Image (cartoon, rainbow, N blue to C red):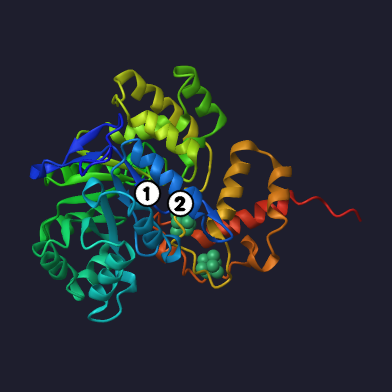
């Protein structure tokens, strides 16, 4: 029977501050549900949510624009099958959509409606960096959410972060936060200074929620040499499980989000974070060897978050990066050629106008036009020579 306490399964949980409530170590990231004909495959995605819930997952993280606005209403419907007090809902305020006074309020009440709830457990200021933080201040977002907290419409206030260390220090110094969500994985630990972000938050007494532990799937694939190192050390463990365990190992981590798109990923993550064991010193050393091997491969560090979806040329940027990364990792020219051929010329890598619109919104700070230019030249190079 499912009670207000929920269904624990064998999932590990961590206590959240003085609330006495416990959050499952695995959280469901709701930006990568299975899709059919451009919309969330509701039947399959509902089964995934049900399986996660019965496996002990009690934290569900969505956002206003995930799946182009479909994620919140879908999640509200899927979770309405369970007692409201038995799970935690997290969603976020997109300040880039806030254009005038009153928009913060309008979006927030729309979110409550979409999610079929009268309160949000963990409310986040979305994708904070210097620019979005300034917008939050300008539109008095923090004051509004403090009021919502006092009224019980949100329980805990935090932010997800894609800025610089200076931005983070400023946010911690100027406002009080209950939690923060950062990109934390063994690749970004140094590359995006996730180590220092984690330390700053921990020193400030702010709990950490991890996003992108598998870096949009890249750390589930790696490269053949790195995979071999991990397989040799633990033949029965998936490559992704190393990344999940790495992210869950630090004590100040409350929950590790994974944007699970299929049943295999969910089963693997449930297994990894049930009866959880942090990485040992020896396992950490193995992981560093695998990382060293992976760093030698020159893949594009895209997480497929789709923040760059509004390209005026309608270029599917993450898909082109995915095809290219597959090629870099496998060296399979024929597969790249076959996969790339159906893309219409007006939407392929060479069609980029270098307008820069995408780079301005990329949380990974990728120089997208430069990457596309380089990919266009590689693809041009591997095209079969004309017969005459
Ligand atoms: S720089 Fe290129 S890929 Fe990016 S938005 Fe402009 S046209 Fe699209
Ligand atoms: S290029 Fe950047 S914004 Fe676009 S999907 Fe990849 S990581 Fe996200």
Label disc, if present, on residue 307 of the rendered structure: none
Report the Cα–Cα distance between label 2 and label 1: 7 Å
> Could you classify mark 2 by the number of other residues whose Cα lies within 10 Å: few (under 14), some (14-19), or many (20 or more)?
many
Q: Quadrant of residue 13?
A: top left
Give 293 or 58, whichever is nearer the viewer.
58
Q: Quadrant of residue 270?
A: top left
Residue found 50% across the figure and 42% down from its top: 262
Q: Residue at x 22, y 44 (%)?
A: 208
Q: Quadrant of residue 256?
A: top left
Q: Is residue 302 visible?
A: no
Q: Residues within 10 Å of mark 1 (few under 14, many from 20)?
A: many
Q: Is residue 93 left or right of residue 143?
A: right
Establish if 260 lies above or below 94.
above
Instruction: Report the quarter where the C terminus lies.
Output: bottom right
How many numbered marks does the figure carry? Answer: 2
> Vertical placement of 146 versus 231: above or below?
below
Tell me where residue 144 appears, x and y as whole percent.
15, 70
Q: Which residue reaches farthest front? A: 1
Residue at the far bottom in the pictured view: 100
* Mark 2 in CB contact with mark 1 (< 8 angstroms): yes
Looking at the rendered structure, the secondary structure element under dot 2 is loop
Q: Position of residue 239 (x, y in %)?
A: 47, 30
Residue toward you, 106 or 206: 106
- Label 2, ligand 2: CB separation under 8 Å: no
| Residue that badge 1 annotates | 29
Residue 178 x %, y %: 15, 51
- Pointer 2 residue: 32
SS state under label 1: strand
**Residue at 27% across, 54% down:** 90
Q: Quadrant of the N terminus?
A: top left
Question: Is the residue at mark 1 in contact range of ligand 2, meaning its CB lies under 8 Å from it?
Answer: no
């Amino acid at each position: 029977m499912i009670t207000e306490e929920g269904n624990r399964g064998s999932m590990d949980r961590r206590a959240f501050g003085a609330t006495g409530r416990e959050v499952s170590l695995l959280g469901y990231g709701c930006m990568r549900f299975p899709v059919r004909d451009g919309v969330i495959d509701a039947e399959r995605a509902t089964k995934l949510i049900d399986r996660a819930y019965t496996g002990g997952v009690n934290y569900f993280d969505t956002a206003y624009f995930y799946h182009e606005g479909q994620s919140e209403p879908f999640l509200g419907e899927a979770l309405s099958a369970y007692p409201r007090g038995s799970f935690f809902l997290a969603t976020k305020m997109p300040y880039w959509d806030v254009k005038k006074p009153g928009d913060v309020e309008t979006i927030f009440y729309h979110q409550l409606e979409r999610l079929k709830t009268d309160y949000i457990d963990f409310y986040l200021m979305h994708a904070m960096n210097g620019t979005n933080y300034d917008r939050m201040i300008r539109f008095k977002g923090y004051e509004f959410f403090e009021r919502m907290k006092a009224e019980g419409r949100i329980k805990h206030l935090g932010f997800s972060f894609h800025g610089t260390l200076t931005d983070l220090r400023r946010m911690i110094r100027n406002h009080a936060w209950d939690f923060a969500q950062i990109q934390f994985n063994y690749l970004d630990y140094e590359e995006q200074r996730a180590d220092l972000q984690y330390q700053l938050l921990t020193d400030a007494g702010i709990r950490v929620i991890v996003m992108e532990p598998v870096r949009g799937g890249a750390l589930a694939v790696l490269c053949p040499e790195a995979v071999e190192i991990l397989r040799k050390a633990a033949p029965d463990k998936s490559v992704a499980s190393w990344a999940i365990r790495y992210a869950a190992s630090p004590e100040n981590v409350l929950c590790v989000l994974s944007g699970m798109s299929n049943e295999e990923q969910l089963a693997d993550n449930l297994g990894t974070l049930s009866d959880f064991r942090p990485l040992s010193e020896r396992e950490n050393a193995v992981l560093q060897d695998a990382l060293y091997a992976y760093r030698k491969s020159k893949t594009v560090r895209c997480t497929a978050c789709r923040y760059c979806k509004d390209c005026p040329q309608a270029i599917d940027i993450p898909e082109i990066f995915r095809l290219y990364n597959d090629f870099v990792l496998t060296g399979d020219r024929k597969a790249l050629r076959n996969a790339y051929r159906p893309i219409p010329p007006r939407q392929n890598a060479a069609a980029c106008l270098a307008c820069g619109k995408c780079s301005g919104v990329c949380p990974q700070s990728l120089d997208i036009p430069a990457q596309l230019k380089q990919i266009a030249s590689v693809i041009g190079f591997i095209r079969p020579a004309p017969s005459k």
